[in-house]
Amino acid sequence: MSNDEVQSLRAEVARLTRQVAALEDAQQVRRVQFAYGYYMDKGLYQEVVDLFAEDGEVRFMGGIFRGKHRGVSRLYLDRFRTTFTHGRNAPAYGFMLEHLQLQDIIDVAPDRSSARGRFRCFMQAGSHTSKADRVGALPLQWWEAGVYENTYVRQEGIWRIQVLNYCLSWQAEYERGWAHSKPHAGPFFEKTYPEDPGGPDEILAQRPAFWPQTAVVPFHFPHPVTGRPHE
Amino acid sequence: MSNDEVQSLRAEVARLTRQVAALEDAQQVRRVQFAYGYYMDKGLYQEVVDLFAEDGEVRFMGGIFRGKHRGVSRLYLDRFRTTFTHGRNAPAYGFMLEHLQLQDIIDVAPDRSSARGRFRCFMQAGSHTSKADRVGALPLQWWEAGVYENTYVRQEGIWRIQVLNYCLSWQAEYERGWAHSKPHAGPFFEKTYPEDPGGPDEILAQRPAFWPQTAVVPFHFPHPVTGRPHE
Amino acid sequence: MSNDEVQSLRAEVARLTRQVAALEDAQQVRRVQFAYGYYMDKGLYQEVVDLFAEDGEVRFMGGIFRGKHRGVSRLYLDRFRTTFTHGRNAPAYGFMLEHLQLQDIIDVAPDRSSARGRFRCFMQAGSHTSKADRVGALPLQWWEAGVYENTYVRQEGIWRIQVLNYCLSWQAEYERGWAHSKPHAGPFFEKTYPEDPGGPDEILAQRPAFWPQTAVVPFHFPHPVTGRPHE
């Protein structure tokens, strides 16, 4: 075996190692996001928070929640867990919040330290009529759909959520459907923490579009054929 | 090329071979489960049974159906095919049983002989009003959702279903939605085969939770970030 | 290192290279199809057309649209964009056409020049009541489901859609559900272009089955366990 042949074989193995790592990384990112969906279904809010990096954040309903142990915990533990499952880290009788996760497009950075992922969420949510302690502010039963454009980081070899950016597209009461959604009904955050004890650290200057308004959630990836970035 | 270098290159290639096999295995498991969904849509019950290992089993509605040619065939061929498509291995006019399969989290054992897979199913089901021979026991039209925690085995290089464990989460009549599902309405099996000719080989001691009750379907995988098993 | 050992290592690396390429190809095909869904959601019809090969085609509602710059553009740009978004390549106020893409089964040809993919589409569509310029021919709000059996080609290293074959399974008005879909209501194409300015280049001799009729969309892949092709 000549030196050139050795070099060539080594280069091929190095290239394969990079390719396989990228495929595995994308699978791990999918796993993190799909687990997020399964946890959200069942009130496992501590498990949700544990998916985040220390300096992770959530963008939700026009607010930014910063820091795993501050803003992210405030949203999932103080706000959702208190409201939806009465402070228990478990599913509540007669409360539904199904988070179907699908249609992943994932791009891992060449240095394997970060990744971007677009996912879709399709939700079935609400309360059963036999539930005594219904959450007053919520519709009895509703459909919801949205798109995530998230960022993930790899730390100590483990993929975590850096930014969960949930862009709600529409909500519709089960009884009436999306043709009759109340316009401009989005429950956007108005006040920051601590004025709102479960509020965000920052209010986004521009509120996201909400059905019947429509807007494109910016794509992190270029067009797969032309290679052009989206406007 | 020194002996050490040769050893190192060989080890890298061996590692890559294992990694690539695991990625391919996971894709094959997905294919088996996704094909299951497409077959269930269309009354292709023989094709469903053919996805199982010889000693495969189904856990469904509080019963266990054992053996590809015994319990599994009894459920899909004797029970479903007879009831839903009048014994024909084909879709029936005006009968719908859409089985959307999504949100896969798959773990292949290091020895490649078995795998675990969590999937979600979201269903649209029912009969068209123009269908003369409707199935009396079924609602006219309904939504259904559930989670699978399945086991797969690799035999002769081919992945098969070892245990299909379908954990139904909720059903809802189209007209009324999940806020109004009849409580405790789950059609659980009461009798075993042969007393019930299409019944299971065993009744589970504990009945699964059924909406408006809620329960976590145990996770086969540990938390993706903390690595802790779920309770 | 003996010559035999060198040969064996080279063969292993060559095999790994093929396997990894097939895994990457399947991911690229998924990306193309998933991007299709995101673009269709939002009236990005030019981006949809750009996913096709030059001689690509669409099979839709009993018609064949041939050629990226002819039939495919006629369908997406002249017909859909004009009708749905008033000629703007952007989402329209109060118009919904959500294209959830899932359940992919992808097979890449050994020479990597082409691939087949089966996907499922689940749609939420319609107009908000506050929208002044509703599309008269469409229901106010509806569910839709279908299966794609598509072909993709790889040209200049880039995967493109060769044949988008959308097999609509059912539509249902939101208010009434699929038990009450109007039978034989499929909006099949009756005339070809140019007699129908947005019509297909060819009408399929046999119209596809449409709910409450049911039919199996032929599978491009053999049964994953028995290896038998489907009838």
Image (cartoon, coloured by chain):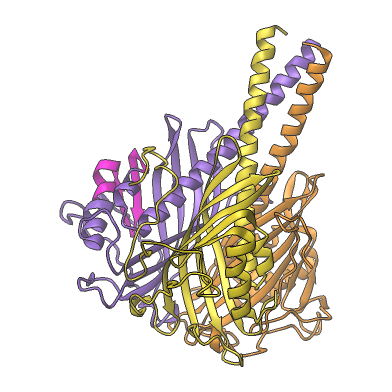
Chain colours: A orange, B purple, C yellow
Q: Is residue B38 visible?
A: yes
B231 left or right, relative to A63: left
User: In x, y percent, where is residue A42?
Assistant: 55, 66
Q: Residue at x 17, y 54 (%)?
A: B197
Q: Which residues are magenta?
A: B51-74
Q: Nearer the viewer, residue C200 or B79?
A: C200
The x, y position of residue C159, in whole percent, is 65, 48
Magenta segment: does it hold A62?
no
Taking B39 as reference, is C61 above or below it? below
In the rendered image, which quarter contains the C terminus of chain B? Answer: bottom right
Which image quadrant for residue B184?
bottom left
B165 horizontally vs A11: left or right:
left
Question: In the rendered view, would you say B174 is above or below A166?
Answer: below
Query: What percent of the width, then of the height, locates residue B69?
Result: 25, 41
Towards the viewer: C62 or A16: C62
Which part of the image, by quadrant, shows the N terminus of chain B? top right
